[in-house]
Image (cartoon, rainbow, N blue to C red):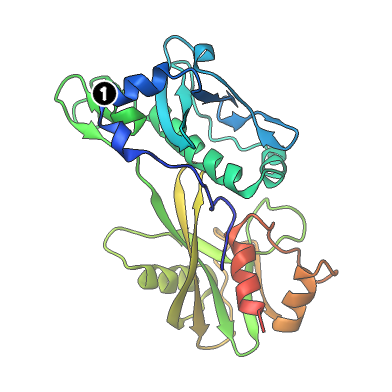
């Protein structure tokens, strides 16, 4: 089974409660209800686990998001009115997340994305009036025109181009020293996944690919993307790098990839294990 990072949440999202005002109110009154402790958008972690507290500790002006049920216990996240996402992602955060159990890493990913969305959508995109949270925190409704808004996920293709026993890897600007990974880019309107893979590989590296196959997907909560991992067959190995997108690119052999994934020294450093690029490389290199 392919199990990328940020997947594997075991919480019941309890959609039946989101549209049930009485049931939702009962969940908020439940003495067992838990609130995820966040520092802005970052999680509080103790002893390798997420920290939860009572709903009584939620800021008085906060919107509450019903994350779902674990057993019979309702679990929530709060969106304080003062929260202003900056887009910053501390390097220590990823190390912290990698230490969490898989199901908690996935639960935090959902919470972070929806809390970030609320903080960015306090006003209606249709008429500019303020919006209120509704549907258990899984939507916002305009006070003026009544338009309803819901969290969105941005599709991103992340892909390897293979040619014989080699695979194409790229290096982004500002990445940790030696780090190379799969190429990636947003799917544009009116575009299929396969078309996006072909376009992005051509634009970033000057490589034509075909026979594109899907491998796996991963939610990426920075702020709210769905990484769609694919592999395509390259026509040749000639590279024309777009310097605005990549700092460098290289072709690596299967033996070299396997060695790096085992932790051996090589020409590049592999993506971290929680990233779907690592999953994608591992699947490609699998015998």
User: Which x, y percent locates residue 217?
Assistant: 48, 61
The residue closer to the viewer here, 265 or 96, is: 96
Q: Look at mark 1 in the image and give the residue it sits on.
A: 21
User: Percent x, y for residue 76?
Assistant: 47, 27
Quarter of the image with the N terminus in it: bottom right
Q: Secondary structure at mark 1?
A: helix
Compared with residue 48, is residue 247 higher up or lower down, i.e. above or below? Answer: below
Q: Residues within 10 Å of mark 1 (few under 14, many from 20)?
A: few
* Relative image position of residue 287 (x, y in whole percent): 67, 84
Outermost residue, left side: 145
Quarter of the image for residue 144 reads top left
Q: Residue furthest top?
A: 60
Which is more toward the observer, 13 or 130?
A: 13
- The residue shown at (49%, 36%) is 111
Q: Is residue 197 left or right of residue 40?
A: left
Occupied quadrant, residue 193: bottom left
Q: Is residue 95 above or below residue 155?
A: above
Q: Splitting the image into 4 quarters, where does residue 260 fall?
A: bottom right
């Amino acid at each position: 089974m392919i199990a990328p990072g940020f997947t594997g949440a075991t919480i019941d999202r309890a959609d039946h409660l989101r549209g049930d005002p009485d049931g939702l109110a009962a969940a908020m009154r439940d003495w067992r209800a838990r609130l995820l402790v966040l520092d802005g958008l970052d999680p509080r972690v103790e002893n390798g686990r997420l920290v939860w507290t009572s709903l009584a500790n939620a800021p008085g002006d906060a919107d509450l998001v019903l994350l779902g049920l674990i057993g019979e216990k309702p679990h929530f996240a709060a969106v304080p009115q003062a929260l202003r996402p900056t887009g910053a992602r501390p390097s220590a955060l990823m190390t912290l997340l990698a230490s969490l159990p898989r199901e908690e890493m996935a639960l935090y990913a959902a919470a972070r994305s929806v809390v970030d969305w609320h903080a960015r959508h306090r006003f209606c995109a249709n008429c500019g009036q303020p919006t209120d949270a509704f549907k258990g925190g899984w939507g916002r409704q305009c006070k003026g025109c009544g338009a309803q808004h819901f969290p969105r996920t941005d599709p991103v293709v992340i892909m390897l181009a293979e040619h014989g026993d080699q695979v194409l890897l790229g290096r982004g600007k500002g990445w940790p020293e030696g780090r190379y990974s799969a190429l990636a880019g947003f799917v544009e309107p009116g575009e299929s996944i396969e078309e996006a893979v072909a376009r992005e590989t051509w634009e970033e590296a000057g490589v034509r690919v075909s026979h594109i196959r899907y491998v796996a997907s991963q939610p990426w909560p920075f702020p709210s993307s769905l990484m769609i991992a694919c592999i395509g067959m390259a026509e040749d190995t000639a590279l024309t790098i777009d310097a605005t997108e990549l700092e460098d690119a290289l072709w690596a052999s299967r033996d070299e990839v396997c060695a790096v994934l085992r932790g051996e020294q090589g020409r590049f450093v592999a993506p971290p294990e929680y990233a779907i690029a690592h999953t994608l490389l591992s699947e490609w290199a699998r015998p």
